[in-house]
Image (cartoon, rainbow, N blue to C red):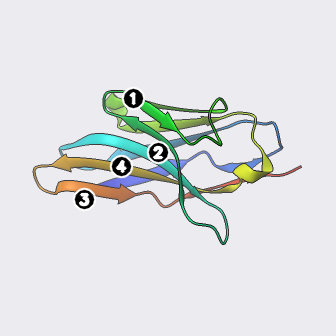
Amino acid sequence: QIQLVESGGGLVQPGGSLRLSCTASGSSFNIHAMRWYRQAPGEQRDLVATITSGDSTNYADSVKGRFTISRDGAKNTVYLQMNSLKPEDAAVYYCNAKGSSNVLGLFNYWGQGTQVTVSS
């Protein structure tokens, strides 16, 4: 099994910054892509950003130019640097990892979520 542990959420004022981290742990696996999603109360879970094992990135239009996704392959960790935060960015942010392993085959795991609150 793969475990995803997130950290870095919290309360920030509009215009501020936060950096989320998500580390994948387990035995002998390969990550194909990691993603950040977010879900506000009463809303669906939306894709925010993607990074592949080849470091290709993609962003939701609503965060382009403000958020940056990056990864440390050696640590199986993905980061989401969030700048110029707006109240509408407030949500629970979830990390997602897709990959493969000899034991699991193809897998798709989620983190537990970390709350981001943007308020003055």
The residue drawn where x is 45% and y is 38% is 78
x 89%, y 49%: residue? 120
Q: Residue furthest left?
A: 102
Helix, strand or loop at mark 4? strand
- The answer to which of marks 2 and 3 sits earlier in the sequence is 3
Circles 2 and 4: CB atoms closer than 8 Å: yes
Name the mark on residue 41: none
Q: Which residue is mark 1?
A: 56
Q: CA distance from mark 2 to mark 1?
A: 18 Å
Helix, strand, or loop for circle 1?
loop
Image side of residue 57 versus residue 9, left or right: left
On the image, the x and y values in percent for residue 95 come to: 46, 51
Q: How far apart are labels 4 and 1 at the CA level?
A: 15 Å
> Observer-nearest residue: 115 or 85?
85
Looking at the rendered structure, the kind of residue marked 1 is Ser
Give the mark, 4 or 3, whose residue is nearer the N terminus.
Answer: 3
Dot in front, 4 or 3: 4
Q: Residues within 10 Å of mark 3 (few under 14, many from 20)?
A: few
Foreground mark, 2 or 1?
1
Q: CA distance from mark 3 to mark 1?
A: 26 Å
Q: Quarter of the image holding residue 105?
A: bottom left
Kind of residue at badge 4 = Ala
* Mark number displayed over residue 1: 3
Is 88 located above or below residue 19 in the figure? below
| Residue 22 badge | 2
What residue is shown with label 4? 97
Residue projecting furthest to the front: 61
- Label 1 neighbour load within 10 Å: few <14, some 14-19, many 20+: few
The one nearer the camera, 11 or 35, is 35
Distance Cα–Cα, label 2 vs label 3: 16 Å
Q: Residues within 10 Å of mark 2 (few under 14, many from 20)?
A: many
Badge 3 or badge 1: first in the primary sequence: 3
